[in-house]
Amino acid sequence: MKFFTSIALMTVLGIGLACKKNPAHTNRLAAENPVASQLAYSFVGATSYTKSDTIRIKFKNISESVLVVYKPKPVFIEKKVGNEWQKVQILYCPCGASCPPPPAQQLLDLNKEMAFFWTQIENWCVDKVEETRQASTGQYRLRVQYSTSPTNYDRQMAYYEFEIR
């Protein structure tokens, strides 16, 4: 009887060890095939806009948990100048106004979307007076900073590139 108990115990331990994932193998597969490491988000938007269009881009949570989007307002747009990306100036609040601060973060539930809009107007303040200009043609991108859970402070960047022609 002791012999059969020992055999059963060794079989259970052997199966348990055989079923354990090999983290090095998993990481290697993810590095070799980025699709294997599932993205937490998707973007929906056009890749080309005319100067009269409003830029509309949706950021959707396709992960298996809540995403945290950091500093969702004002929208964060960058323009490619040469080989570098430069931040486009977009006001959150009118010049000289007393506005509540923008939200530090926003939770995005499973399969929910967050929409970002930009009218292609760059604006900034000079001595409490708003200066504006129409965005020029070129390559742009929306930047979204997020993490994969409210307790995960490892922030990641997601980018969506588009053109203004």
Image (cartoon, rainbow, N blue to C red):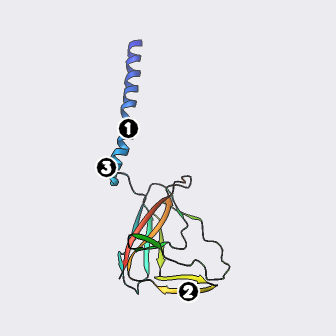
Q: CA distance from mark 1 to mark 2?
A: 57 Å
Question: Which residue is at a point 37% across and 18% down the rendered structure image?
Answer: 7
Tell me if 70 is positioned left or right of 35 in this view: right
Specify the farthest residue to the left.
32
Question: Which residue is at a point 43% across and 58% down the rendered structure image?
Answer: 40
The quarter of the rendered structure image containing the N terminus is top left
Question: Which residue is at a point 60% across and 71% down the rendered structure image?
Answer: 102
Question: Which residue is at a point 43% across and 70% down the rendered structure image?
Answer: 85
Local secondary structure at mark 3 = helix
Q: Position of residue 117 (x, y in %)?
A: 47, 77
Q: CA distance from mark 1 to mark 3?
A: 15 Å
Residue 45 appears in the figure: no
Q: CA distance from mark 2 to mark 3?
A: 48 Å
**Of callouts 1 and 2, which one flags the residue occurring earlier in the amino acid sequence?**
1
**Badge 1: residue crowd in 10 Å (few <14, some 14–19, many ≥20):** few
**Camera-side mark, 1 or 3:** 3
Question: Which residue type does callout 1 highlight?
Answer: Asn
In the rendered image, the vertical position of residue 156 relative to residue 59, given as above or below: above
User: Which residue matches tag 2?
Assistant: 131
Q: Position of residue 122 (x, y in %)?
A: 50, 82
Q: Nearer the viewer, residue 86 or 92?
A: 86
**Camera-side mark, 1 or 2:** 2
The quarter of the rendered structure image containing the C terminus is bottom left
Local secondary structure at mark 2 = strand
User: Which residue matches tag 1?
Assistant: 22
Q: Position of residue 89 (x, y in %)?
A: 52, 77
**Badge 2: residue crowd in 10 Å (few <14, some 14–19, many ≥20):** few
User: Which residue matches tag 3?
Assistant: 32
Specify the farthest residue to the front.
82
Residue 37 appears in the figure: yes
